[in-house]
Amino acid sequence: AHASSGTFADAFAPTGRTQMRHALRLCNAAALRLPAAAHLLPAASGATRSHSAAAYVQNNDRNFPDITVEFRAAAPGSLPDPFALVQPQLRPLDSSIRELVGTDHPVLAAAAHHFFERAGKRFRPTLVLLSSAAAAGGDPADARQQRLAEITEMIHAASLLHDDVIDVADTRRGAKTAHRIYGNKVAVLAGDFLLARASLLLARLKDVQVVELLATVIEEMVQGEMMQVRALPQQLLEFEHYVDKTYRKTAALMSLSCEAAVLLGGKPPDHAEALRAYGRHLGIAYQVVDDMLDFTGSAESLGKPALSDMQQGLATAPTLFAADQFPQIREMITRRFAEEGDVATVSELVAQSDGMRLSAELATSHAQKAADALGVLPPSEARDALLHLCFMVLNRSA
């Protein structure tokens, strides 16, 4: 059985500045209670670093990794670069995906490949590969886990193709979106094709639990999109609704693919639960920071217009927090910033409020909980790389 994202979001129902302190206390009180490891094992002999287990981040007396994650703080220099660590496995991913999504229809193939031609650091495949290794004490992901990393990226690409059509987005990562080049119908079909191909490859893994998890990912993403486009005016003001939607649209893929990687490796249930929690908290932190960047970033750095969330009628964490100090924002939220001047007015009020600071606290709280969730795993270079990702998410600039 899988944890309900709605239950998880219950800790975040309060929306105001005073209520935010309450929400953070609830977040701390509701921190995942993971079973303590009976003992911490040394890094496996197959780990990519020859240091002893003592060279890695150890657990504190609460059985959490002895590390504190802070917003915009540099990670300790001892933590390895997560992307460099899995680069040998990431490098062939592009060519492998090109082969996996091949089709006889040239336009459909071009649209399906459009996303992969401009992909970034492969954040989600990196998560899968590192989760696989961390659960194994440092041993690298096997062939089935590498295939799962590819499937995860294909599902992510399909969701973005569909999102761009729904959001009528002109650009992504500084380039024209697929639907602007090939039209809405082809872009939607390209997304459908990627999901179908991902499902076929998933079935070939011959693991019913993993198939169920990734099918749940797709279901959650669809439900999250429906929550976004069909929300009632009152729901737009509710922090619980925002966090639940954030889990479904962004964090579910990270969370459940991390869990699936552990299951494919045949590792203990407490390892799978730990990495599911890690992915859930990291994914929420990732999206909250993304929502902050919508206010502070430029079109060049973001690869899309600044303030695009409000232009699409969406109220995110900074706006919801600011509405506690400036109640006039609430009316603009419920009408989805539809009147002339709404976006500019709210942008100014958010800058004058504590909205950004409270959003940073929320993101940091989740990033720390992601780090804490790794306590049941044995210290290893892969676990340290996952800890490094907690800092990287809070230091994103694009």
Image (spheres, rainbow, N blue to C red):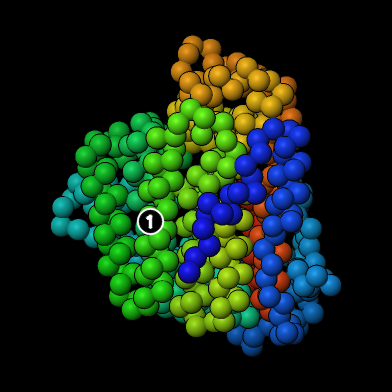
Which image quarter is the C terminus in?
top right
Single out the residue that lies furthest toward the left: 104
Residue 276 vs residue 48, the one in the foreground: 276
Does residue 301 appear anywhere in the picture? no
Q: Residue at x 45, y 28 (%)?
A: 312
Q: Is residue 46 above or below residue 208?
A: below
Q: Residue at x 53, y 41 (%)?
A: 241
Q: Is residue 169 left or right of residue 236?
A: left
Residue 201 vs residue 33, the one in the foreground: 33
| Amino acid found under the numbered disc labelled 1 | Ile
Residue 40 vs residue 209, the one in the foreground: 209
* Residue assigned mark 1: 218
Single out the residue that lies furthest toward the right: 61
Residue 194 vs residue 375, the one in the foreground: 375
Q: Is residue 373 above or below residue 208?
A: above
Query: Measured from the top left, where is residue 38 in percent x and y?
Result: 73, 84
Query: Measured from the top left, where is residue 261 in percent x and y?
Result: 49, 72
| Circle 1: element type | helix
